[in-house]
Amino acid sequence: MSERGFASDNAATVHPEVLAAIARVNVGHAFGYGHDEYTLSVEAMFRAHFGEQARPFFVFNGSAANVLSLRAACRPWEAVIAADTAHLNVDECGAPEAIAGIKLLTVPGEDGKLTPELVLRRIARVGDEHAVQPRLVSISQCTELGTLYTAAQTRELAELAHAHGLLLHVDGARLSNAAAALSVPLRALTTDAGVDILSFGGTKNGLLAAEAVVVLRPELADGFAYLRKQSLQLASKMRFLAAQFHALLSDELWLRLAAHANTMAARLADAVRGVPDVELTRPVQTNAVFARLPREVSSALMEQHAFYVWDEHAGEVRWMCSWDTTEDDVDAFAQAVRETAAARIPGGV
């Protein structure tokens, strides 16, 4: 087992309340594929958080949630507008193209964010049968660079998309972290902001293996059950996925876990700010800290601590905090950063 580190919130443990919820439903027999009373009750919890029109569909992983969202919203000749740093573009191994058959129209955005002006650049050749047709705008909340869209910014993008006959998708793998950082309910950044379809993350916030597509525009739910089955994401023992979300959405566990991860990232950023040769490169708004440091410093740190080099050419690294990151974890790592950086400075201690 590897040492505790800052590589990813995917590396964190499963929250005890989630494991307990799985154990609670591991009694007796229940109809499979989601046709059980327990799963139906959890779907009602989603409606409480996202609105009465919300339709949740549970899947195994975030890539599936994203690709299924695209399949539900787009036809084969249609395209998705996204930031060039989007998980859809960088970290899905071509799944949107290979599985959904959807072209991505990417644009560079500051700190990983789209703006109406950037989106408008990609709404072109509408009605031209020789050109792929834009259909969906996809944003990540939080972005891959740890930054946030406010509710007003999301609403502005939704209004622009709708005015041009497009839809808005949110890759919400870390939506809980965004809502915690902005001190707003989940629906404020989704339903109330005009979002049409959402990938809602659980695995990065204490769950074992459960994500959800939350359809907020009712017509997009038509046929979605068939898409999920065809995409190999229909769980036969659905109650065990539902149980995880029952725990997450009960007693604001989602908020408590995400807020803690955000707090640990802020603590880490404060601890390394001002260390010679260490430069924070992105706003620290959620549970990610991005920094630039000399290659030999990051290499030496990685011998003892797990984290990713984000941009090898720029020397930028990413340090992710999780629901189970402790103050001791942060303080020990920050001390290691200070000592390793000082060791390369003549006369440093």
Image (tube, helix red, strand yellow):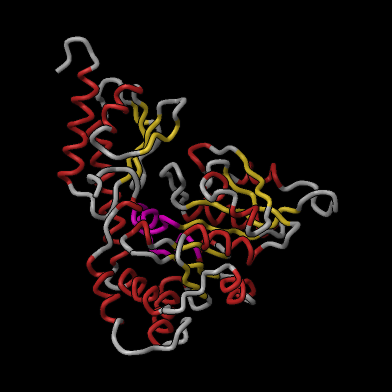
3 magenta-colored = no
Q: State left or right for residue 318 relative to residue 123.
A: left
142 or 344: nearer the viewer: 344
174 magenta-colored = yes
Which residue is painted at 28% across and 59% down in the image?
A: 257
Location of residue 205 by image quarter: bottom left
Q: Which percent across, then down, holds residue 345?
A: 23, 14
Q: State left or right for residue 104 relative to residue 142.
A: right
Q: Which percent across, then down, holds residue 167?
A: 64, 60
Instruction: Please give the range of residues in magenta.
Output: 173-190
Location of residue 303 by image quarter: top left
Which residue is painted at 43% across and 44% down in the image?
A: 147
Q: Which percent across, then down, holds residue 108?
A: 58, 37
341 or 44: nearer the viewer: 341
Q: Which percent across, then down, holds residue 259?
A: 29, 55
Q: State left or right for residue 214 relative to residue 209.
A: right
Which residue is painted at 57% across and 74% down in the image?
A: 229
Establish if 173 lies above or below 316: below
Mainly helix, strand or loop, the magenta region?
helix
Which residue is painted at 47% across and 86% down in the image?
A: 35
Residue farthest to the right, as pictured: 129
